[in-house]
Image (cartoon, rainbow, N blue to C red):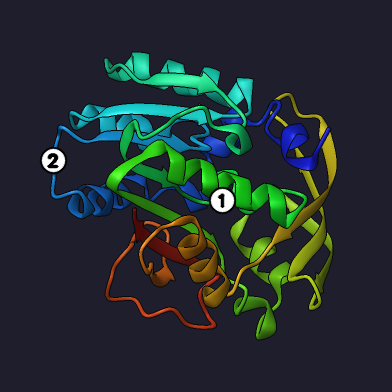
Amino acid sequence: MTWYEALFRNYAETYEKEEYIQGTLAEVDFIEKEIKFDKSKRILDIGCGTGRHAVELAKRGYAVTGIDLSEAMLKKAAQKAEAAGVKVEFKQQDARKLPFHEEFDLAIMICEGAFPLMETDEMNFAILKGAYNSLKKDGKFIFTTLNGLYPLFHSVKDFLNKETSGATVAENNFDLMTFRDYSVFETTDDSGNAMTLHCNERYYVPSEISWLLKSLGFRQPDIFGATLGAFSREDKLATDNFEMLVIAEK
């Protein structure tokens, strides 16, 4: 079992309390603006987790499909949709093997939803390819990913220990040859059981993201600094941004 499968097997309630997910409403405001508030748009949420974006978009009148690898996270998402009185199609699905073909007007993948958590670059690329195939012509892809410029100037370990409540990064090593960050993550699951996870995440520099997306057929993407809960096209990407916000059109 991979580290991300182990983490999200029983983590939905704890995830809901994390500080870094509290900006959902403003993030959905940004997403709506990007699609010009067109309620006819069909939306795919890749790595939807507990459905925070999917449910909010459904509450605003959009047809949303959310996919995630974790059964527990999807169960929580379904409960939230039911409580909100909205219908969202949630599916347990591997983001590397998306079955959709030109079905959606918008794909979103926020806060490391699947990409770039995969063990190899090829797996991460498969996620981007699946998103491309899922979109109709002129469809839009909005996602955030880890900014490879950040570890060159800052400590990833210090950032994560500051931003992640109830968890500790005990060890951390950023490999300059592969732009992969290897860390030992210590936390507890929803049942109070201690977990020690050996994580492996890929950081990307803007030129890589542009090349990967254009090689799939996307037009030249726009890349910005990503401030969670405050996405903006006005935020120029800088070395201080832990994440980048990417917007591409098919």
Q: Residue at x 62, y 20 (%)?
A: 71
Q: Secondary structure at mark 2?
A: loop
| Relative image position of residue 19 (x, y in whole percent) | 50, 51
Can residue 165 be seen from the camera position used here?
no
| Relative image position of residue 30 (x, y in whole percent) | 25, 54
Of the pair 206 and 183, the residue shown nearer to us: 206
Which quadrant of the figure has residue 222?
A: bottom left
Q: Residue at x 62, y 38 (%)?
A: 96
Q: Is residue 239 left or right of residue 172?
A: left
Q: Is residue 116 left or right of residue 44?
A: right
Q: Residues within 10 Å of mark 2 (few under 14, many from 20)?
A: few
Can residue 65 be seen from the camera position used here?
yes
Q: In the image, which disc is placed on residue 112?
A: 1
Q: Residue at x 27, y 50 (%)?
A: 31
Q: In the image, which disc is placed on residue 38?
A: 2
Q: Which residue lies most toward the bottom here?
A: 153
| Relative image position of residue 198 (x, y in whole percent) | 85, 50
Mark 2 or mark 1: name the one nearer the start of the chain.
2
Which quadrant of the figure has residue 239?
A: bottom right
Q: Residues within 10 Å of mark 1 (few under 14, many from 20)?
A: some
Where, quadrant-wise, is the N terminus in this rendering?
Answer: top right
Marks 2 and 1, how far apart at CA: 26 Å
Q: Nearer the viewer, mark 2 or mark 1?
A: 2
| Amino acid bearing label 2 | Asp
| Amino acid bearing label 1 | Glu
